[in-house]
């Protein structure tokens, strides 16, 4: 994205001076379109309510980058853990350890909104883990 327009990701619309707002909105609409094209159609509904680049980006970041690398590693390890050449007690200990790491990064929640955010994050990580090898860098 970039091209000198990073402020659209970090500056809310109400922080733009009125004299610049018309031009800012035009550019924001174009960049917003680019953002939409970069989103997997299966997750579009999670971001549909956000009508500016700033709001869209803020929500996407909140959903998918909070501890995302650690969370990705834990989920990846959970999915790929196998007993293979280790004894049963070591295998069970490894599962228990991964469970604790998972619960640290994905604790139980009280509210439906917080639960939805966690569910979205979990399924986004599953989506990333399942990407074809030529898309792994995405």
Image (tube, grey):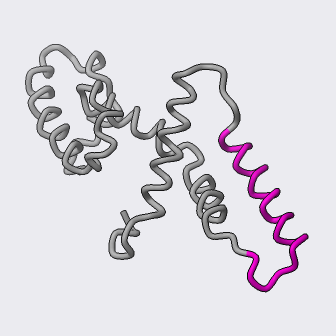
Near-viewer residue (29 or 130): 130
Q: What residue is at 19 percent from the left and 51 percent from the top?
A: 3
Residue 91 location (% of width, % of height): 82, 70
Residue 44 located left or right of residue 126: left
Asked if residue 66 lies left or right of residue 84, the reply is left
Please state the total of marks drawn on the protein image: 0
122 horizontally vs 29: left or right: right
x then y, percent, for residue 1: 23, 51
Q: 100 or 82: which is nearer to us? A: 82
Q: Main secondary structure of the magenta part?
A: helix
Of residue 37 and residue 94, the one placed in the foreground of this image is 94
**Residue 26 appears at what percent x and percent y?**
9, 30
In the displayed structure, does residue 50 sit left or right of residue 107? Answer: left
| Most distant residue in the right direction | 89
Query: Which quadrant holds residue 14?
Result: top left
Magenta residues span 83-106
**In front: 64, or 111?**
111
Note whether 99 is above or below 61 in the view shown: below
Residue 79 inside the magenta-drawn segment: no
Picture residue at 35% right of the left edge, 33% below the top: 46
In the displayed structure, 8 sits above or below 135; it is: above
Q: The C terminus lies in which quarter of the figure? A: bottom left
Instruction: Find out whether residue 96 is within the magenta segment.
Output: yes
- Which quadrant of the view contains residue 21? top left
Q: Residue at point 39% right, 65% down?
A: 131
Residue furthest toward the bottom? Answer: 85
């Amino acid at each position: 994205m970039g091209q000198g327009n990073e402020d659209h990701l970090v500056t809310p619309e109400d922080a733009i001076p009125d004299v610049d707002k018309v031009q800012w909105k035009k550019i924001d609409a174009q960049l917003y379109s680019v953002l939409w094209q970069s989103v997997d159609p299966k997750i579009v509904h999670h971001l549909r309510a956000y009508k500016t680049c700033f709001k869209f980006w803020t929500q996407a970041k909140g959903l998918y980058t909070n501890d995302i690398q650690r969370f990705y590693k834990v989920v990846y390890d959970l999915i790929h853990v196998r007993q293979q050449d280790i004894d049963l007690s070591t295998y069970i200990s490894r599962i228990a350890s991964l469970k604790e790491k998972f619960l640290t990064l994905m604790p139980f929640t009280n509210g439906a909104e917080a639960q939805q955010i966690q569910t979205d994050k979990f399924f986004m990580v599953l989506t990333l883990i399942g990407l074809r090898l030529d898309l792994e860098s995405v």
